[in-house]
Each structure stands twice: as structure tokens, then as C-alpha cells.
Amino acid sequence: MALVRVIKPISKERYSVHPETECSCFVFSSNGQVILQLDTYGSATRKNTGQISQSLQFDERAAAQLKRLIEDAFPSLRSNDA
């Protein structure tokens, strides 16, 4: 599990699409701070399928950065409010 506070963009020369898996999310508050948590589960090819494999937690600043990154990658998802 990890609490993400900043996302650092990098460049890669090699990349691949990973196998599909389930992802769940929930929002909670801790010490007055709102946290978004994403949990992924072992894929069908993993030994422990159905168990949480990774958890990422985002505070508001990291979530805002993630939102911008998603909108840059997928322009059709940009809100028309801006």
C-alpha cells in the first residue's frame, strides 16, 4: 500500500499492456484529509486470485494531478467547465 502525494511523469522506450484485473475504489477521511483508495486484485494468472494485490491512496493534491494527467491522455474526458 502507498499514499501518493506527487506523480512524476517519465518517458519509457519499452512498454506493454498488462493483463486485466478487477479494481475497486472507496473514499474515506483520515485526520480531516480526504483519501481516494484504489485496490487491484490478483489477475486470473496470479497465484492468489481475488485477493488485494496493490492499493494506491491519493490525497487531494495527487488526485488533482492524476485528473490533469487523465485529461491530457484522454482529451475527450475534459470537462467543458474550464
Image (cartoon, rainbow, N blue to C red):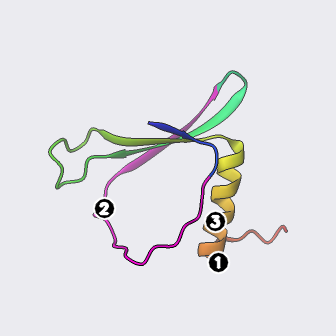
What residue is pinned by disc 3? 69
Could you give the CA–CA distance between mark 2 and mark 1, rounded to whole angstroms?
Answer: 23 Å
Q: Residues within 10 Å of mark 2 (few under 14, many from 20)?
A: few
Q: Amino acid at mark 3?
A: Leu
Q: Earlier in the sequence, mark 3 or mark 2?
A: 2
**Left or right: 23 as drawn, with respect to 32:** left
x%, y% of residue 14?
37, 76
Q: Which label number is shown at residue 20? A: 2
Q: Which residues are magenta?
A: 7-29
Q: For the residue marked with disc 2, what is the amino acid?
A: Glu
* Image: 69 above or below 73: above
Quadrant hosting residue 32: top right
Residue 21 lies in the magenta-colored region: yes
Question: Could you tell me how far apart the alpha carbons at marks 3 and 1 are, in whole angstroms?
Answer: 13 Å
Residue 65: x and y in percent read 68, 56
Within 10 Å of disc 1 (Cα), the crowding (few <14, some 14-19, many 20+) is: few
Residue drawn at x 18%, y 41% as measured from the top left: 48
Image quadrant in which you'd find residue 76:
bottom right
Q: Which mark is drawn over residue 52?
A: none
The spot of residue 78 in percent (x, y) is 71, 71
Q: Closest to the observer: 79 or 66? A: 66
Residue at the spot x=18%, y=50% of the render?
Answer: 46
Name the disc covering residue 76, or none: 1
Tell me where residue 15 appears, x and y as whole percent: 37, 73
The amino acid sitting under disc 1 is Ser
Location of residue 30 by image quarter: top right
Distance from the alpha carbon under mark 3 to that under mark 2 = 21 Å
For the stretch drawn in magenta, the main secondary structure is loop
Packing grade of label 3 (10 A; few <14, some 14-19, many >=20) is: some
